[in-house]
Amino acid sequence: MASSLSLAAAAPAMADGEDEASPHRLSLVAGTAFERKRGEDKEVGMIGVAYAYEFRERLSAGAFVEGMGGDAARDTAAGLLLHWQPTGGWSIFAGPGLEHTDAGNEVLFRVGTGYGFALAENWSLGPEATYDVISGGKRTFTLALALSRSF
């Protein structure tokens, strides 16, 4: 079973006190990934982007793409997410995706949560945690920090 702790593609969340008239959100995420590969722990760099569109109050649909550098088992991952914002800047999200490795593509299902703190007009910064269940019995846990802009 592969497991990793990483700063990964964060799903956008409505920042506390943010203008709800901005339905689009673009997020940039970066960090460090820790994963177990062939019984050995690896630390690698990571960068990603995420987009979400609020189509109904408290509901958004979006996508993410992330890449890891170095000797990571995962080269890239991409997927679609459905977000629910139960209150303020808090977001809960889930959706399917694909993980690309040297061995080929594998299906993943991601669940996660995050919170966006307002920085300035239409800007937010926030932490997120995700858990990927990957075909073949692998699991990935991620922690993320996302800088987001709504428009």
Image (cartoon, grey):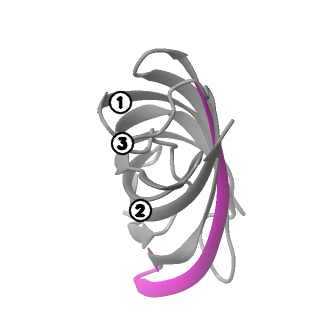
Q: Quadrant of the N terminus?
A: bottom left
Segment tinted magenta in the rendering = 36-53
x, y (%) of residue 100? 68, 53
Say if the magenta span includes residue 7.
no
Name the residue carrying label 3. Answer: 89
Q: Residue at x 51, y 33 (%)?
A: 19
N-terminal-most mark, 2 or 1? 1
x, y (%) of residue 61? 56, 24
* Along the line of sight, the residue nearer the viewer: 32 or 98: 32
| Numbered disc 3: secondary structure | loop
State if disc 3 and disc 2 touch (CB < 8 Å). Answer: no
Question: In front: mark 2 or mark 3?
Answer: 3
Identify residue type, mark 3. Gly
| Numbered disc 2: secondary structure | strand
Identify residue type, mark 2. Thr
* Mark drawn on residue 142: 2
* Along the line of sight, the residue nearer the viewer: 22 or 93: 22
N-terminal-most mark, 2 or 3? 3
* Mark drawn on residue 85: 1
x, y (%) of residue 27? 62, 51
